[in-house]
Amino acid sequence: MTGTSSLLSDLEQSSSLPNVTLANGSTTTVSGLGTTNLNLNLSLSFVLHILDFPFNLLSISKLTTILNCAAIFLSTHCIFQDLNTGKIIGGGHEAGGLYYLDRYGSFRLVASHLSISPL
C-alpha cells in the first residue's frame, strides 16, 4: 500500500473499494488500485492506494504468492528468490529494525544462486 500515486501505473480509482485497518487501529478508505515496479524486472499488481498514507508497505505474503518467490531474511538484508528458476530477483537492506526494498537492482548480491528446502 502507498499514499504516493506517482509510484503507481494503471491506477484505477473507485469508491467501492473496502476500508483497511491501520496499525494504530484507525480505518481508512482505499481510493484505488494500481501496479508498481519493484525493480527493473519486477512489477506488483493490486497495490492499494490510500490518500495521505505516509509510507510504502509491502505484504510479504502477497509478494511471495504473486511472484512465486521465497523471501529470505538475514540480519542485515533480505533476498527474494524465484522458486521456478532459483535466481535472485530482488533484495533489500535492514535499517533501524525495518527492511527496505532496494529498488532498481541496487541491492548487493551475496550469491548468484541460493537453494532452500523445507525442514
Image: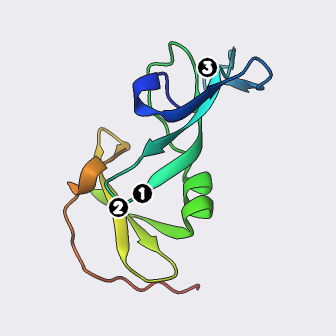
Residue shown at 40%/26% (left/top)? Answer: 6
Label pair 1/2, CB-CB below 8 angstroms:
yes
Q: Is residue 46 left or right of residue 35?
A: right
Mark 3 residue crowding within 10 angstroms, few (<14) / some (14–19) / many (20+): few
Residue at the location (61% across, 53% down)? 62
Of pointers 3 and 2, the one earlier in the residue sequence:
3
Contact (CB < 8 A) between labels 3 and 2? Answer: no
Q: Amino acid at mark 3?
A: Asn
Q: Which residue is mark 3?
A: 24
Measured along the vertical axis of the image, is residue 45 above or below residue 108?
above
Marks 1 and 3, the one that precedes in the sequence: 3
**Disc 1 marks which residue?**
42
Disc number lying in front (1 or 2): 1
Which secondary structure lies at badge 2?
Answer: strand
Q: Nearer the viewer, residue 36 or 53?
A: 36
Seen at 50% across and 28% down, the residue is: 2
Left or right of 94? Residue 35 is right
Quarter of the figure that contains the N terminus: top right
Res. 7 in view? yes
* Spatial CA span between label 1 and label 3: 31 Å
Quickly name the residue at label 2. 90
Residue 36: horizontal and vertical position, in percent?
A: 46, 42
Q: Secondary structure at mark 3?
A: loop
Q: Report which quarter residue 73 is drawn in.
A: bottom left
Q: Position of residue 93 (x, y in %)?
A: 28, 51
The percent position of residue 116, horizontal first and vertical second, equals 47, 83
